[in-house]
Image (tube, rainbow, N blue to C red):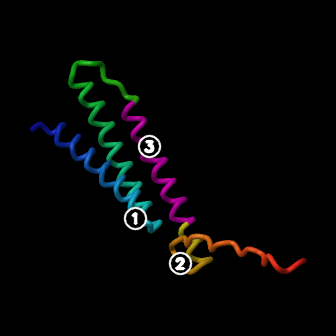
Amino acid sequence: MSAAILAGLTGAALVGLGLYGLLTDPHPLRKILAFNILGSGVFLLFGIIARKGAAAGFAADPVPQAMVITGIVVAFSATALAVTLLLRLFQETRRATLEPDAPAKTPDAGVDG
């Protein structure tokens, strides 16, 4: 098994693990971490695909590398924003989770207004 195949399988495992955590865990901080794991897997897969293209004899293209670096910067800033919003939620409610809305009260049918 070559290093590129092993890295590709690792990237696929990271994507799967991140997607699983994103869909199953209700806690917002864990969702943020799962989203970062998913993004790391995508970046790894994208880098491996670009490397395999260069190994196949195609001309070296700096665009995939630039896109991965840009994606890392965007993911970092989105994570910082999400954590800031989560901290603000905790300051306001003293909870780090979102509760579902309470059912709306219906007016009494026998009372005229």
Q: Residue furthest front?
A: 110
Viewer-proximal residue among 23 and 29? 23
Three-letter residue code for mark 3: Gly
Q: Secondary structure at mark 1?
A: loop
**Label 3 vs label 2: CA separation?**
31 Å
Q: Give the residue drawn at x 12%, y 37%.
A: 2
Q: Is residue 104 magenta?
A: no
Query: Quadrant of the image for the C terminus?
Result: bottom right
Look at the image and give the residue range highlighted in magenta. 64-85
Judged by its main secondary structure, the magenta piece is helix
Query: Quadrant of the image for the N terminus?
Result: top left
Q: Nearer the viewer, mark 1 or mark 2?
A: 1
Residue 21: % across, % down: 36, 59
Earlier residue among tags 1 and 2: 1
Q: Nearer the viewer, mark 3 or mark 2?
A: 2
Q: Secondary structure at mark 3?
A: helix
Q: Give the residue drawn at x 40%, y 57%.
A: 22
Q: Secondary structure at mark 2?
A: loop
Q: Is residue 34 left or right of residue 14?
A: right
In this figure, which residue is indicated by the disc labeled 3? Answer: 71
Q: Is residue 77 left or right of residue 11?
A: right
